[in-house]
Amino acid sequence: MAKRKQQNALKGALVGSAAGAAGAFAMDCYWKVVQNVAGERPEQKPRQGDDQQKDEPSTQVIADKASEAVTGEELPKDKKAPGGIVVHYVTGLAFGGLFGLAASRVPRLGLLGGLVYGALIWLFLDEVGLRALDISPDPEKVPANQHVQALGAHFVYGGATALLTRLLLR
């Protein structure tokens, strides 16, 4: 088997960003299926007692915090859902870019690498990071099936991002 050569790092990051956006879309599609099968989509909700509305997903809380940092004001209620979508896709682009950069340096990084990458994002972003920022509840307050569903969503993201990155880097 011939050894693949390393790709240009910038190309890898750009390709990975595009693949990450597609991975975020694949994640949204996964949630549509899970909602139809398992009921309501589990979201990362703020901790009880937080000043934020308790029914806002983590992406909307982050969009609010970003808006406050830039404009000094929270997002209006009618802009929260679109703001959350922007946060979701920007996060997908950013993590996809990092994966693409790694894939350009490590030519053999493929589907398995993407699945591991998705699991690491779930662990460090969803399970640790959001809780450390007081954006979501402690893990023991979230039903186990919601942790598993969220891990599945991140497997879908990582797998889709990896496959598309590999395809576009060829």
Image (tube, rainbow, N blue to C red):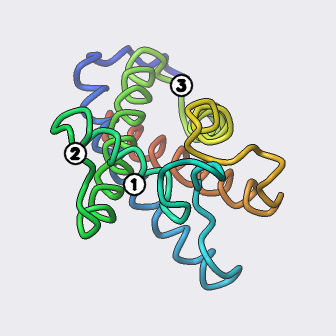
Q: Which residue is drawn at 25% across and 32% down?
A: 69
Circle 3: residue type? Arg
Residue 142 vs 140, above or below: the answer is: below
Q: Position of residue 116 (x, y in %)?
A: 65, 35
Q: Circle 3 sits in a helix, a strand or a loop, which is it?
A: loop
Q: Is 109 displayed left or right of 86 in the figure? A: right
Q: Position of residue 27 (x, y in %)?
A: 49, 59
Earlier along the polypeptide chain: callout 3 or callout 1? 1
Q: Is 3 displayed left or right of 121 in the figure? A: left
Name the residue that disc number 1 marks. Answer: 60
Name the residue that disc number 3 marks. Answer: 108
What distance separates the C-alpha of mark 3 from that of mark 2?
Answer: 46 Å
Q: Circle 1 sits in a helix, a strand or a loop, which is it?
A: helix
Q: Position of residue 100 (x, y in %)?
A: 38, 29
Q: Residues within 10 Å of mark 2 (few under 14, many from 20)?
A: few
Query: In which quadrant will I find the C terminus?
Result: top left
Name the residue that disc number 2 marks. Answer: 73
What distance separates the C-alpha of mark 3 from that of mark 1?
Answer: 36 Å
Residue 147 vs 18, above or below: the answer is: below
Circle 2: residue type? Glu
